[in-house]
Amino acid sequence: MSAPSVPAIEQMAGKGAARAAARKRHIEGGSRRPGWITYVLLAAVLVVSFYPLYYTFLLSSSTSQNIARHPIPSLIPEGHFFDNIKRVFDSVDFWGATWNSVVVATITSVSVVLFSTLAGFAFAKLRFRGRGPLLIFVIATTAVPTQLGVIPLFLVMKNLHWIDTLQAVIVPGLVTAFGVFWMTQYLESALPYELIEAARVDGASMFRTFWNIALPAARPAATMLGLFTFVQSWTNFFWPSIVLRSSHATLPVALSLLQATYFKDLSLIMAGVVLSIIPLLVLFIIAGRQLVAGIMGGAVMG
């Protein structure tokens, strides 16, 4: 039975009730437009967030002499950007480093999403002895600084003869404690037990239930986790700078070679930084709409 119209409510309960009903339906219908204050705040946040990137571009379009004379450049770019880009290509193996970063970031992202979703499904929906303490232990590992495990991890990689190989960067990041915690919390509320029980009644195995039921339900959270993991792997410098040399360097390690010992050409360095950011911008432009749609779809389903 449909709800009574606003004129009918006015006849039965008066004008006050009619105005309240109209206001409620206006809000619930999603037709309420944000005010000008909201747009001003959003514009301010956008400008503040975009300015560091634009400042990097301004430096990359200048020269080291101009930067030394004017550390804060004008808002109009100079005409040396493509010259600095050419110098970056001449100074380092940019395309080789980019390919290494793509390989590392892609494999790491897919692995983290798959294994974290598997572990999150087990912790969220399966009942086994020690589930709670084991999850607490996994979460507690996030409190351990990465620097404390560098020496033992380096010795392991040396014994495996993996120094200066991409697997030395890929294997330690195949799964993360944050990813397990993230997927556990999401599947705890987004995946009803009734769906799992229905799949088991139909004769599906546990892995089949995970693949056909849990993984599609976890797609919004898995998309966010994969995107953030890709960005983190793409920008990771600390561990790759320890185990990789210039022959197998990822993009951040290769760009660090642009810094001379006694002199830093900021225009050259910033040109390399702009080149390294472009793939991430393209990724966000392509996946941004699907990411927001997946998040909203998961919110509506939840």
Image (spheres, grey):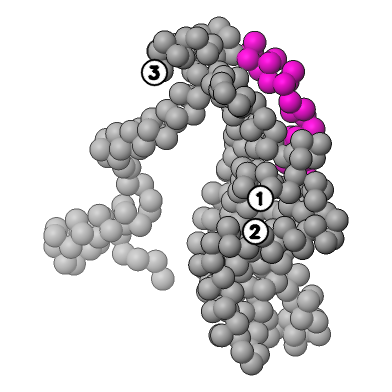
Residue that mark 3 sits on: 72
Q: Position of residue 184 (x, y in %)?
A: 58, 72
Q: Give the magenta-colored segment's residue range.
A: 82-103
Which residue is depicted at the point 50% across and 9% down? 65
Residue that mark 1 sits on: 239
Quadrant hosting residue 109: bottom right
Question: Does residue 14 appear to the left or right of 232 in the view shown?
Answer: left
Q: Which amino acid type is shown beneath numbered disc 1?
A: Trp
Label 2 crowd bin: few (<14), some (14–19), many (20+), radius 10 Å:
some
88 or 281, which lies in front? 88
Per the model, the C-alpha gap separating discs 2 and 3 is 38 Å
Contact (Cβ within 8 Å) of mark 1 with mark 3: no
Per the model, the C-alpha gap separating discs 1 and 3 is 33 Å
The verdict on residue 210 being magenta is no
Work out whether 300 lies above or below 273: below
Q: Which amino acid type is shown beneath numbered disc 2?
A: Val
Whichever of labels 1 and 3 marks the residue nearer the N terminus, that label is 3
Per the model, the C-alpha gap separating discs 1 and 2 is 8 Å
Q: Secondary structure at mark 3?
A: loop
Q: Is residue 17 visible?
A: yes
Question: Does residue 54 appear to the left or right of 112 in the view shown?
Answer: left
Q: Secondary structure at mark 2?
A: helix
Label 3 crowd bin: few (<14), some (14–19), many (20+), radius 10 Å:
few
123 or 146, which lies in front? 146
Tag nearer the camera, 1 or 3: 1
Residue that mark 2 sits on: 150
Contact (Cβ within 8 Å) of mark 1 with mark 2: yes
